[in-house]
């Protein structure tokens, strides 16, 4: 697995609030909750005709780890670096940055 992971510090343990922020921003950009290989993610695309774009969240004691990646049936998972599928990758990086800024601004 190759994913881009951003760690966002949290001042509280309000996991539900963080998940609602991610959900609101992701849904506003066309991402829907999905389960892929047993993992709950927000995804867009099918990975066959359109390269799938995914983000997920995992929590530590004092932060949330936001992962972003693309996925297709030929190459599997790819992080958000490089030139292949550069436009969707840029949009995903922007979305992750917006999530990060919203969490920080809300002092969560």
Image (cartoon, grey):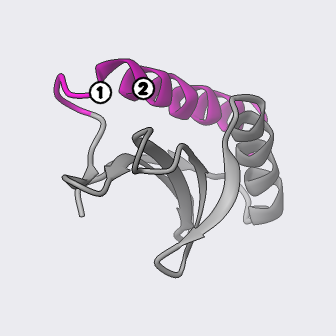
Residue 80 in percent (x, y) is at: 30, 36
Answer whether labels 2 and 1 touch (C-beta < 8 Å). yes
Q: Quadrant of residue 86?
A: top left
Q: Quadrant of the N terminus?
A: bottom left
In this rendering, the answer to whether 21 lies above or below 34 is above
Give the residue pinned by disc 1. Answer: 85
Residue at point 76%, 39% (across, down):
27
Q: Nearer the viewer, residue 43 or 23?
A: 43
Residue 82 in percent (x, y) is at: 17, 28
The Cα–Cα distance between marks 2 and 1, rounded to whole angstroms, is 6 Å
Q: Nearer the viewer, residue 50 or 63?
A: 50
Asked if residue 96 lies in the magenta stretch, the reply is yes
List the single residue furthest toward the bottom. 38
Mark 1: few/some/many CA within 10 Å (<14, 14-19, 20+): few
Residue at point 40%, 41% (across, down):
51
Residue 33 in percent (x, y) is at: 70, 58
Determine the secondary structure under disc 2: helix
Residue at point 41%, 50% (across, down):
47
State the mark number for residue 15: none
Mark 2: few/some/many CA within 10 Å (<14, 14-19, 20+): some
In this rendering, the answer to whether 38 lies above or below 31 is below
Q: Nearer the viewer, residue 11 or 49?
A: 49
Give the residue pinned by disc 2. Answer: 88
Asked if residue 31 lies in the magenta stretch, the reply is no
In this rendering, the answer to whether 24 lies above or below 84 is below
- The part of the chain drawn in magenta is 81-108
Q: Quadrant of residue 29?
A: top right
């Amino acid at each position: 697995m190759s994913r881009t992971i951003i760690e966002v510090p949290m001042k509280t343990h309000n996991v539900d609030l963080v998940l609602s922020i991610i959900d609101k921003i992701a849904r506003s950009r066309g991402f829907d909750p999905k389960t892929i290989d047993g993992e709950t993610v927000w995804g867009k695309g099918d990975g066959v005709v359109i390269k799938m774009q995914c983000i997920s969240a995992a929590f530590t004691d004092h932060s949330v780890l936001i992962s972003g990646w693309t996925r297709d049936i030929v190459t599997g998972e790819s992080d958000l670096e490089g030139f292949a599928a550069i436009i969707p990758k840029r949009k995903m990086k922007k979305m992750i940055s917006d999530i990060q800024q919203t969490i920080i601004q809300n002092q969560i």
